[in-house]
Image (tube, helix red, strand yellow):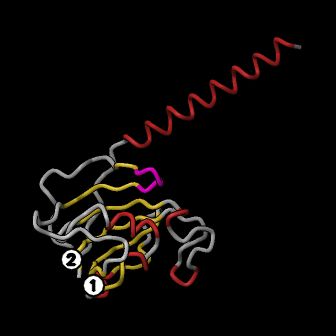
């Protein structure tokens, strides 16, 4: 009886260890660069092939570094951005590039993943985000935009200006 208990605990511990190793390997996996929407401009010559993950779970990679003298927004800064958003299967659900017009809003009026991501870059920068549901639309989704509940979101954000 005691041996079975220890064997079960050992197998459980091994399963946890293997799960942690697999999740770390996933974070370091190279991901192909996204196809940029028409009008997005250029990216840096050698952008990262992997994502960096923040403590909150936001994944990002900077595709183009901004101007050295460019402003970096705070959560309450008014920002002008272009964006392109798609779901894991590749379906685009919204894009200011397609509409032909950037948007201007306070950074903290967007989803949490955008607010956090924008504070990582300066004017002129472009980044790619992979946003877990808890930093996106959570369990509500946005049915009218085709975003299901608990969806992982993907975005290209281009910070044009911090006002």
Q: Quadrant of residue 64?
A: bottom left
Q: Which residue corresponds to the image point at 26% horizontal and 73% vertical from the top-left?
A: 37
Graded by Cα atoms within 10 Å as few (under 14), some (14 to 19) or many (20 or more), the crowding at tag 1 reads: some
- The answer to if 57 sits in the magenta stretch is yes
Which residue does the numbered mark 2 point to in the structure image?
A: 160
Q: Quadrant of residue 130?
A: bottom left
Relative side of 51 to 125, left or right: right
- The answer to if 125 sits in the magenta stretch is no
Please provide percent x and percent y for residue 57.
47, 53
Q: Which residue corresponds to the image point at 37% horizontal and 40% vertical from the top-left?
A: 28
Tag in front: 2 or 1: 2
Span highlighted in magenta in the image: 54-58
| Label 2, label 1: how far apart the Cα atoms are | 8 Å
Helix or strand or loop: what does disc 1 sit on?
Answer: loop
Please provide percent x and percent y for residue 1.
89, 14
Q: Which residue corresponds to the image point at 62% horizontal and 31% vertical from the top-left?
A: 16
- The foreground one among 74 and 110 is 74
Q: Is disc 2 in contact with disc 1, using a CB cutoff of under 8 Å?
A: yes
Among numbered discs 2 and 1, the one appearing first in the sequence: 1
Q: With respect to residue 65, does 9 lie above or below?
A: above
Please provide percent x and percent y for residue 21.
50, 32
Which residue does the numbered mark 1 point to in the structure image?
A: 102
The residue most toward the top is 3
Q: Which residue corresponds to the image point at 41% horizontal and 75% vertical from the top-left?
A: 108
Looking at the figure, which quarter contains the C terminus? bottom left
Helix or strand or loop: what does disc 2 sit on?
Answer: strand
């Amino acid at each position: 009886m005691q041996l079975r208990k220890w064997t079960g605990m050992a197998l459980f511990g091994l399963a946890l260890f293997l799960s942690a190793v697999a999740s770390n390997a996933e974070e370091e996996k190279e991901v192909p660069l996204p196809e940029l929407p028409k009008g997005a401009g250029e990216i840096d010559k050698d952008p990262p092939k992997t994502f960096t993950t923040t403590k909150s779970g936001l994944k990002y990679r900077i595709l183009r570094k901004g101007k050295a003298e460019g402003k970096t927004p705070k959560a309450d800064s008014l920002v002008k951005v272009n964006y392109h958003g798609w779901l894991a299967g590749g379906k685009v659900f919204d894009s200011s590039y397609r509409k032909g017009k950037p948007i201007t809003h306070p950074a903290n009026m967007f989803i949490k993943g955008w607010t956090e991501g924008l504070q990582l870059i300066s004017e002129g920068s472009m980044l790619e985000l992979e946003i877990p549901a808890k930093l996106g639309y959570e369990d509500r989704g946005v049915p009218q935009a085709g975003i299901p509940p608990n969806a992982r979101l993907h975005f290209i954000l281009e910070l044009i200006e911090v006002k």
